[in-house]
Image: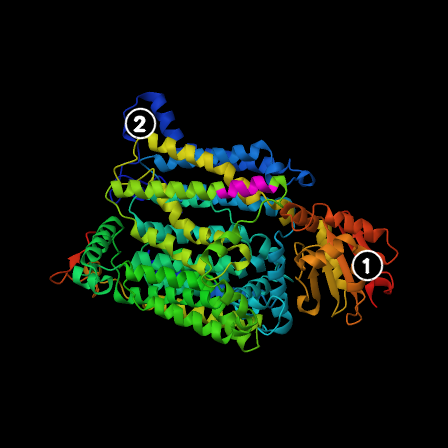
Amino acid sequence: MNAVRRIVWPIALIASAVAVLVVTEVHVLPGIRQGVAMWFLLVCPGMGYVQFLRLRDVWAEWTLAVALSLSLGAIVALVMLMAHAWSLRGGLAALAAITVIGAALLPFRGEPRPDVAEERSRWQRPPAPGREQARP
Amino acid sequence: MANLYDPTNIQSAAHPGTRRAAVRPGVSQMRGGIGEMVALWDLLGPFAMVAGALVLWGLSLQRVDLDRMTDLGLVSVLPVTFYMAIGLLSVSFVWVVSRPRMPGALLALHVAALVFMVHATPTILYGTLRYSWAWKHVGIIDYIFRHGSVDPSLTALQAYHGWPGFFGLGALFTAAGGWPNAIDIASWAPVYFNLMDLGALLLIFRALTRDQRLVWSGVWLFYITSWTGQDYFSPQALTFFLYLVAIGICLRYFKPGAIPSKEAFKRYLLFGWAASLVRNVVVRASASESPVPATSRGTRLGLMLIAILALVVIAFSHQLMPVVAIMSLTLLVVFQRLRARTLPLLMALATAGWALYFGWPFIRANLADVIAALGTLGSNASDTFRNLSQASPGQVVIALADRALIGAVLVLAVAGGIRLILNRHWALSAALLIVAPIFILGITAYGGEIGFRVYLFALPFLAFLAAALFFPSLTAGTSSRAAFSLGVVTLALLPGFFLAYYGKERMFYFTPQEVQASDYLFNTAPAGSLIVSGSDNWATQYKNYEMYTYVPISREPRDSRLDITAHPVDALTRWMSDPKYPATYLIITRSQKAAVDMLGLMPAGSMSRLENALRSSSQFRVVYENRDATIFTVASAPSGGLR
């Protein structure tokens, strides 16, 4: 799984970013263009960053990747709209850059520390006197 | 693809966190061929039932005659095999969810099949985009293509320009896919938005309970009671998904680890008894819900950033959803279900900042209505429930069905909540998230839809509580009686769901002929034209929309409508001879007539009588007509309607 996260996902994400830029510029079958575009815009901009979080929950990872991808896409589109400069090329280039940065980060993500499960946030410290720890 | 029946991939419902052997104990003890056959059926049965349901569904679509649709909508033309397919799928789902072994992927397959069968049916049958509002949303994307921006000062469809997030994103999807407009992508929106919601629902429900039976039953009940139709190509569909994701992140990863002391509660609740009561509920709720997964500080930071981005997108994409998000987050913070205490404030700032900056032209133009609606909770709520005295008999049945469905969901949720409490589980987060949307009743009537929006926003949590009626604790609900009850309730809810969800399809459906007429109109009408229509329920405003003036007769003041009903030729001649318009048109379509008659917007048959009067008048001339649509212009205008 770590190999997938460290190697396969970065390659797939960068390849998707390149592919979407290519298929929107050269003539390809409509089905191919639509498939690549949907895949890229729905999943790729967010997936690199979500993989970086190591959630160990496939459902959560895919859901958050889609939500983050759509959020990033909407923000990029909004910036272009407000600048009176909405364009497909500009939007895809920005999202491809975001995707490549997210993918490039993945190989450098360290292994989880063995004690990560024991790590407690400042909210999860043992309760102070008068404060009751919630039972798991 | 994970092996569904890999023992390491299977969690026991009653004992989550433990692994069970892949073979059911009872089956392993059976001898010979019967035992093997039972094991094989156990393995392949659900797949066979899902496949059977899909085949039955596919066959049933071939026998639908849309021309025979009555005021009961698609319900009146779908063959019995369609309902048998849904029934078979439901039985299979209940069977799988009640088994000791319940692979998530198999349950997801059932839910995905349900979503596809329910929401792809109109798309496949019609071949055209349904809902007039979806066409208008296509029109905003068309505007973005032509102008590269939006213009909040435009008066037509102004709110969309003030909150353009969804449309900017939709334009990216449309252009990247190489489509000339967003019609194709919009046609499938109910399918992909509902599938996306599945992931968000799982995120939330898994934060609320460790019982996977409760998680998946809640998901199932959500989909068979979500009838409000807000899953079409719209800002609300996108923001609803993002709202669920943001709430899911908060509930799953940002629950407080410790509960403040009674004194801390007393500081803002003032009374000691109230502080004790609330603190006890919070402590019990904390013990009932799933523990927070161990995460590093960096992971939590990343998750919070995703939630914040989702909330920011909500703030600039929709007017109503940000208010619901603020209320939900505030309640979660106040009742110690969310430790990110500044998140509601951040969302409030983003919402107010956007509304006062980019959304201000719309708010200023509608300020009087906004102020008038503030605080009129009862009036806003009652606006939702249309006066049925004017509606057609079929629509009275539909309205009663959707009200009954809402009532049934509420009763089930209350009963489920009580059963949870009796089993010492307090679903406080779910209860808070049901209450939160109610506050928007005091803000706006939202075009008479506000009650249904409240229902939609609360529905995920109502469905969760309703599912708790069958699985109130990890050890309860293991008997076949629970499964039987869930099956009976599912089958009892389905008729109400289909009536409520499919019941208005006679007006939501636009035939290919109607779309051809709209295409003709928007391809030939010169900029600045006046376009009069019977109602606003037609394929409209999807191309060059800002270039025209639209006048739906059914939305005119009562006196104008009475004038047109009594003297159609004279009244419309006056309207359509105004020299300030280079051309004037009147379009009457099948779906406009359906909307007027079904909803009682004008006396039944008004549109047909109007059409006949214009046809027989020398003042008007038909410039286009087909089976389902007619376009008139004044006879004095040159060919094509140009003056």
The first of marks 2 and 1 along the sequence is 2
Which SS type dominates the magenta stretch?
A: helix
Packing grade of label 1 (10 A; few <14, some 14-19, many >=20) is some
Quarter-of-image position of residue A120: bottom left
Residue B11 at least partly seen? no
Q: Between tags 2 and 1, which lies in front? A: 1
Rendered residue at 67%/57% (across/down): B558
Residue B639 percent coordinates (x, y): 86, 63
Q: Which residues are magenta?
A: B395-403
Q: Position of residue A40 (x, y in %)?
A: 49, 62
Tell me how far mark 2 sits from mark 1, CA to CA. Answer: 81 Å
The residue singled out by tag 2 in the image is: B27
Mark 2 residue element: helix
User: Which residue corresponds to the image point at 86% horizontal and 51% vertical from the top-left?
Assistant: B616
Of all residues shown, which one is farthest toward the bottom?
Answer: A83
Q: Which mark is residue B570?
A: 1
Q: How is the image coloured?
A: rainbow
